[in-house]
Image (tube, rainbow, N blue to C red):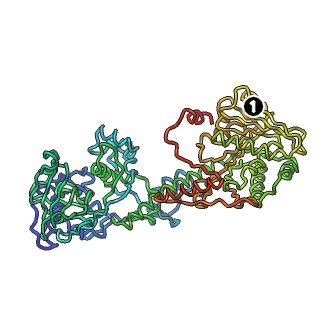
Amino acid sequence: MSSPRTTPADWTETFRKIVALEIERGFNNRAVVGGLDQFRLHWQAEMESRVANSPDAAFLLSRNYGEMPPEQRESWARRWMELLDGSPSIPSKPTPPTSTDSIPERTDFENFLNPPQVVGSADGRTLPKPRPAYLLPPAGRSVDDPVDSLRGINARTVDRLKRLDVATVRDLMYLFPRRHEDYSNVVSISEVQPGRECTVIGTVWESRVISQGPKGRRQDTEAILGDETGNVRAIWFGQRYLARTLPSGRKVAISGKADVFRGQPVFQSPAVETLEIEQAGVHTGRLVPVYPLTEGLTSRALRGFTWDALQNWLGGIEETLPDGITGPLPDDEETWQVARTRLAFDELLVLQLAVLGRRRESQVEVTGVSVQPPAGVVESFLDSLPFDLTGAQARCIGEISEDMQRGAPPMNRLLQGEVGSGKTVVALAGLLSAAAAGFQGALMAPTEVLAEQHFRSVSRMLEGLPRPVQEDNLFSVHLPGLDRPVSVGLLTGSVRASVKRVLTAMAADETLDLLVGTQALIQEGVSIPSLALAVADEQHRFGVMQRSALRARGGENPHTLIMSATPIPRTLSMTLYGDLDISTIDELPAGRQQVGTRWVPQERRPDAYDFVRKQVADGRQAFVVCPLIEESARHRSQGRDG
């Protein structure tokens, strides 16, 4: 029932009659012989021109009408009738509410993550529009349903997708491409340039299976394609089955780079799409996504599954940004980069909101410990040091002291500074404040080596005070102004059982003031009932649960100090550590050399090794840090107990 190609007016009138008949027949796809998709493909260029400025263009052109459920067919047909009659292509926006009573306040964290789906409000806010019905998942289904809810995904494919951490439809939509192949350059055959990616649309004149390799064991498919400007050869290595899907007379699109063979351009294993059967523009003629793969799962199959999810389930993804910020994007390199930025922004936004929500929860109705040490006690420790504090160290000690004296909400602070900037003495000042005020403190390090290093550093810094006493894993000293000694213990996984029993008993009966150790501090049987300050060094090597377990050693909500030797840019720290106040030691002690950092590319690795050899030959030292490929028994033991 298709019309001869004459003028645009002819096709619109014919199409109007077809759509009207389709509506009359209840959207059974029988208004035209071969279905509406055959008409759509025949008049593709004219239809694209008609909907070029419509926000529904992707739906009106790229959907397979024959595979739509009835409600989506109805939406597709009525929207086309509106366009053909000159009416708006989408329903008009709903009238904004006349008062703010019906708009919930966006102070609640959950409401912000899932904003009300309205277009406007009386207070001038612009919120996301409702998703069009044709984008919504099937009735009763959700994007969090198993991925085999999509067409063509069987149990075997489900197992393969699990290797890519894809279990639900949502997971599939958030499996982002590693890169894109630019097949958007559509050219005629006469315009094909060797070595340049392009897409050619033509008719298959001939296709056949050819034998190659030793004894003809490899069987390839060879096809000749033509358009009004010429012919071109394409070959698919080891894919004999393609010869059956590329019969003579079939219109196809191929995308890739042409090589030159015997003076003629040849496409070798290009992407191919049969336009009469598949939806145009999934694998060719556009920026084609290249996804991470696993054994048994092809790029083409994964691209098809993702296309189906985006075309039919996208409306189930919650939009968090106002409508004025988002909008349709064309399919090109520039806006692809914009889209990537948007996805990155989404991740950072949710992370920031979660961090701020955690910060709010930590400060609302949370009681802490007010640490008020006797006057002059901590100052006597600082005066006993054989060096002067830097201005940055003194400032950070003041910030920590002010937080701990306030008490509520408990301190939650990040102390950052380069290696050698003096973070340990700042942390020790806070720990001694807790001890002098009658409380306990703990310092947890990720490894035994680092824990022992901290214990030795603390012992050395306290040696200038009266009557120091050193025992196995235990050190005590008198602070001027206190009528009792302050004791410091070291608890790690390798500590002898007898010593561990002594230290845990002292900590439990509150006669051990400061405890330095590894994750052994948070093992069952360790109690620090008067814990007022918990310090974690190299915090990125501890999980949230580990740090929480350390704080839980005490009966109250202790203050928390996190130490990091990794300089963190302000913008990154606001995103990752927005729940923490930040103190920065931004100057080195007098006489301390600046640490230099150099990045050496792979091709200059021999030069780097030569530099190291020369430094060692001159009497200096060097060490090489390598990633741990396979854990030894010793590493596994340290992983369990510190």
Of residues 135 and 291, the one nearer the viewer is 291
- Relative to residue 548, is residue 239 depicted above or below? below
Q: Where is residue 483 in the image (x, y as percent from the top left)?
A: 90, 39
Residue found at x 61% / y 40%: 546
Does residue 341 show up? yes
For this view, does 298 lie left or right of residue 479? left
Work out whether residue 231 or residue 168 is closer to the camera in this orientation and state it.
Answer: 231
Q: Which amino acid does label 1 sit on?
A: Leu
Q: In which quarter of the image is residue 463?
A: top right
Residue 285 point in image, percent of width and height = 25, 63
Specify whether 509 is left or right of 105.
right
Horizontal side of 384 relative to 211 (left or right) equals: right
Instruction: Read off the residue under disc 1.
Output: 503
Count of all numbered marks drawn on residues in the image:
1
Question: Residue, x 75% and y 59% (percent of image)?
Answer: 589
The residue at 59%/56% (across/down) is 614
Which image quarter holds the N terminus? bottom left
Q: Image quadrant for the C terminus?
A: top right
Does residue 436 lie above or below 383 as drawn?
above
- Measured from the top left, where is residue 208 in percent x and y? 10, 53
Residue at disc 1, secondary structure = helix
Label 1: few (<14), some or many (≥20) within 10 Å? Answer: many
Q: Residue at x 65, y 30 (%)?
A: 524
| Nearest to the observer: residue 211 or residue 23 | 211
Percent coordinates x, y for residue 554 in the rendering? 72, 37
Return the residue found at the far top. Answer: 498
Residue extending furthest toward the front: 617
Instruction: Please say whether residue 16 is visible from this viewpoint.
Output: no
Q: Horizontal placement of 26 versus 175: left or right?
A: left
Q: Which quadrant would residue 484 be assigned to in this image?
A: top right
